[in-house]
Image (cartoon, grey):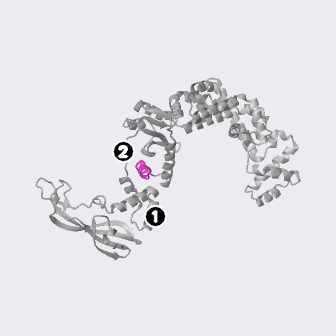
Amino acid sequence: MKQRFRPASLVPAGLMVDGITTEGDRVVVRARAAGSACLCPDCGAISQRIQSRYYRRAQDLPLSGRRVELRILVRRFRCDEVLCGRQIFAERLGDHVLAPRARRTDRLDQIVQHLGLALGGRPGASFAQRLMLPVSNDTLLRVVRQRARVPSEPLRVIGIDDFAWRRNHRYGTIVCDLERRRPVVLLPDREPATSEAWLRHQQLVHTVARDRGGGYGEAVTRALPQAVQVADRWHLMENASRAFLDAVRKSMRQIRTVIGATLVDPTLLTAAEKLQYDGYLRREETNTAVLALWKEGVPIKQIVRRTGHHRQTVRRIVRGERSDVFRPRQSSLDAHLPWLDARWDAGTRNAAALWRTMRKGGFRGSLRVVSEWATRRRRAEETDASSLARVPSARTIARQMTTSRDHLTKAETMTIAAIENGVPALVEAREIVADFHAMIRVRRPEPLESWIERASQSLVASLANGVRRDEVAVRAAILLTWSNGQTEGHITRLKLVKRQMYGRGKIDLLQARLIGAL
């Protein structure tokens, strides 16, 4: 049996339709409340005495590509209660229909809120115009702020991390509920005092996942001394890999000696490589001057004042992390070198001709790249080609040393074998880092103490010292299932929302869009 269409189905529940007309691009629906009595908003008494009537206008969901305007006949009632301070009141339609003083129905307000959550101000307003929703960008953001709800569930397991308002300048803090997998609050900065003040109101929290920074650890220790702190496993793995990379950088001088590329003949370099070589010589002079002052016992602050270099640069030189060496630059020609060598041996020595042939085959580099290669090859034939031996970068060496030999070429295998034989300390560091990774993967914290003692005597002593200072949190990270990966994912969402607003969204709007979208 077919059901008959009822005009009341066009309006929110609780309203009756008196008539429908079309005015230009709008559909005007005249409606009124279905009840005959109303409750006084002050005393709650029921009143049926009507004092007067008036029309109230509100926007509703569009209909057939037209905007819809509700003209609701609202009645004013008189309260007969003697003790009530209100004599006349207007009937309430209910917040689920039309809130007091609202210009949009609740169901339209929900659509406006979700548009603001998903798209923001201007993009949301532009899309709303296509949907025949009469809202501006300011209205969208205002509705998002008004309807924002902070989660009220008790927190037991949380993740805390920082995010950048502006990288290297200003940072904030995000807190996530790891059990419900959703963000809870954004804090305006990452100062320990701010985090501590918020954590003091969350006494039910028993587990806190955080990064390796010391600020959040101190705040949790002071505010929630009974809570278990869990270091982030991904950061532990990344810190171990970075420690091995730093060990390779510190050993670059020994590696150059082992490979046999300690000297560079400037006469064999192209114009671009000479510029790199000049920069290398300047850096060597700076390193020598800073190390001389350091050996004399001059503190880092005084070295900075005397030399004029940045404090971080001086620290890297003192720690041996700036012993970078010159190496002929690698380029987009690497994939085409076998073909170039074959054509060169066949007698084709014209760089322009080689470049034109490569362009037809899909090469997208410039003529200058091929010309520099031809110049280098021509000069190599005039001298000992071994003087042009290329030293891989520290990052490349670290990657190849931690990669299975089955995935390396023969030349790379020979280079790594020479490094392992000539610099055994790097082999020990690689084994120590591998053992640390294995502990995290198989969840076995028992060897942690012996690992710390072993690593303290190696090239990755800085990693061991950091693990020793945060040993309880590291041990919890190995044992427990909680980690800060969820928080990192929400930070990625937060960056997307922030960039949608071109970095101009304030913290309340960011929090409303981040939490309200879930």
Q: Could you say where residue 454 lies in the image, as x and y percent from the top left?
A: 62, 25
Looking at the image, residue 8 lies above or below residue 198: below
| Mark seen at residue 127 | 1
Q: Residue at x 50, y 29 (%)?
A: 472
Please provide percent x and percent y for residue 322.
66, 35
Q: In the shown orientation, is residue 288 left or right of residue 239?
A: right
Tell me the residue at 75%/45% (across/down).
273
Quadrant of the frame with the N terminus = bottom left
The residue carrying mark 2 is 152
Element assignment for label 2: loop
**Residue 19 or residue 172, whichever sits in front:** 19
Along the line of sight, the residue nearer the viewer: 254 or 158: 158
* 84 w.r.t. 216: above or below: below
Instruction: Give the left or right position of residue 402, taking residue 219 as reference.
Output: right
Q: Nearer the viewer, residue 74 or 294?
A: 74
Q: Secondary structure at mark 1?
A: helix
Quadrant of the rendered structure where residue 424 is? Answer: top right
Labelled disc at residue 136: none
The magenta stretch spans which residues? 505-518
- Majority SS type along the magenta span: helix
